[in-house]
């Protein structure tokens, strides 16, 4: 199943499936402890609004019909006001609004106060992808979390404002450059879900998607073991090829010669590039410097928007990128 198909399922394109898994009303399935609270308050507010809309318009139409001019052609206005009635329609809705505020405020505090023993994952947004760093420093382009265990996401951005949103968990938080924000959830069912960016962040904002996998503890431990040494036994070129697609490189660096937000990797190896620091030859040292210190020498005609991968790429991964670019020819 493609990520776009998964996203449309959760957004409401398959209402039959959603009605079976969630609470209906075109909502995504409820897959976290937060979801039921959020949906319950939302539906309460919606139903209250529907009730009073029907009540007010019903009374209005009845009064228009009851006291129509054709039935009372010479009627004179004698009513001024009705104090008990005015108190009722002012005080009773006030209690309802106070209840909405109290429940919403209480749930807000719960949603924004992570448990002290929660499992923490670092989330980084950048134009235009999400990356996730797990305990041990391992980074991946998919979010994997254990089921029935509180998880805290520590979120930041390397460039502009993004917003990380998992519809099935009813959790959303801005990713702000230069600071950390947090959200937490406890997933209640295993499976695959979608995450997306809900803050317009540039031309490829709608492609800023990620897969979310909820697993058992055993499956999650196996996943961490896998990503700790995913490149072992692989050809360096294959390592670089995978990173080009999964680490966000493809968002800016094409493989067909087309210029994007950054220079194409096709035919770049051995080429002399004119940068703001003078001519640079694209070789091992230049590629390594561009990965770790992307602002050290910016190619003329391009903006200095690439985030650093220092502390994110391990040596075999850097060597894989170099090998892959080299394999594309000179």
Image (cartoon, rainbow, N blue to C red):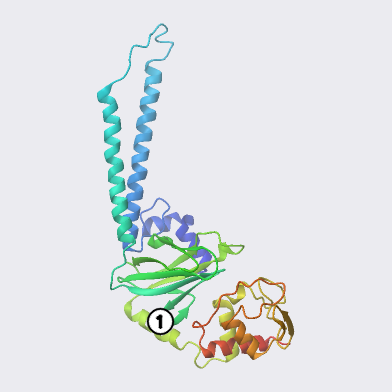
Tell me: 274 left or right of 88.
Answer: right
Q: Residue at x 31, y 62 (%)?
A: 33
Extreme residue in the top direction: 74
Q: Residue at x 74, y 86 (%)?
A: 271
The image shows residue 220, relative to residue 196, as above or below, that is below
Q: Residues within 10 Å of mark 1 (few under 14, many from 20)?
A: some
Look at the numbered disc 1 and give the secondary structure of its residue: helix
Residue 119 lies, in percent from the top left, at 33, 74
The x and y percentages for residue 180 are 43, 68
Q: Which residue is mark 1?
A: 223
Q: Quadrant of residue 244?
A: bottom right
Q: Residue at x 54, y 65 (%)?
A: 160
Query: How many numbered marks have been drawn onto this rendered protein structure?
Result: 1
Q: Residue furthest front?
A: 277
Which residue is located at x 42 percent, y 7 percent? 73
In this view of the protein, which residue sits in the foreground, 251 or 219? 251
Q: Which residue, as the protein is rendered here, is positioned at the far bottom?
A: 233
- In the rendered image, the vertical position of residue 297 relative to residue 319, given as above or below: above
Q: Is residue 280 above or below residue 46?
A: below
Whole-percent x, y for residue 283 in the image: 67, 89
Which residue is at the front of the view, 167 or 191? 167
Q: In the shown orientation, is residue 6 left or right of residue 258?
A: left
Could you say which quadrant of the image residue 206 lies in?
bottom right
Q: Quadrant of the C terminus?
A: bottom right
How far across and down, in percent of the image, does residue 279 sit?
Answer: 73, 84
């Amino acid at each position: 199943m493609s990520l776009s198909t998964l996203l449309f399922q959760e957004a409401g394109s398959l209402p039959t499936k959603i009605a079976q898994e969630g609470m209906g009303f075109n909502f995504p399935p409820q897959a976290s402890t937060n979801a039921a609270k959020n949906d319950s308050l939302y539906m309460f507010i919606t139903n209250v609004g529907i009730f009073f809309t029907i009540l007010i318009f019903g009374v209005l139409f009845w009064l228009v019909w009851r006291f129509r001019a054709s039935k009372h052609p010479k009627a004179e206005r004698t009513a001024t006001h009705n104090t008990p009635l005015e108190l009722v329609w002012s005080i009773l809705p006030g209690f309802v609004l106070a209840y909405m505020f109290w429940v919403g405020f209480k749930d807000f505090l719960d949603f924004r106060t992570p448990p002290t023993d929660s499992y923490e994952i670092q989330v980084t947004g950048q134009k235009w992808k999400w990356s996730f760093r797990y305990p041990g420093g391992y980074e991946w382009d998919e979010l994997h979390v254990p089921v029935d265990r509180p998880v805290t996401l520590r979120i930041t951005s390397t460039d502009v404002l993004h917003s990380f949103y998992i519809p099935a968990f009813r959790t959303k938080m801005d990713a702000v450059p230069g600071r950390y924000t947090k959200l937490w959830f406890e997933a209640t069912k295993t499976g695959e879900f979608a995450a997306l960016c809900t803050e317009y962040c540039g031309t490829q904002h709608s492609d800023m998607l990620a897969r979310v996998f909820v697993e058992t503890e055993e499956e999650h431990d196996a996943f961490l073991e896998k990503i700790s040494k995913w490149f072992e036994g692989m050809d360096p070129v294959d390592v670089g090829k995978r990173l080009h697609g999964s680490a966000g490189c493809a968002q800016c660096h094409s493989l067909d010669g087309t210029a994007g937000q950054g220079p194409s990797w096709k035919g770049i190896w051995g080429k002399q590039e004119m940068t703001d620091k003078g001519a640079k030859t694209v070789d091992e040292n230049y590629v390594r410097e561009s990965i770790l210190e992307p602002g050290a020498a910016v190619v003329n005609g391009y903006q200095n928007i690439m985030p650093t991968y220092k502390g994110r790429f391990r040596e075999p991964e850097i060597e894989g990128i170099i090998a892959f670019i080299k394999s594309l020819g000179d």
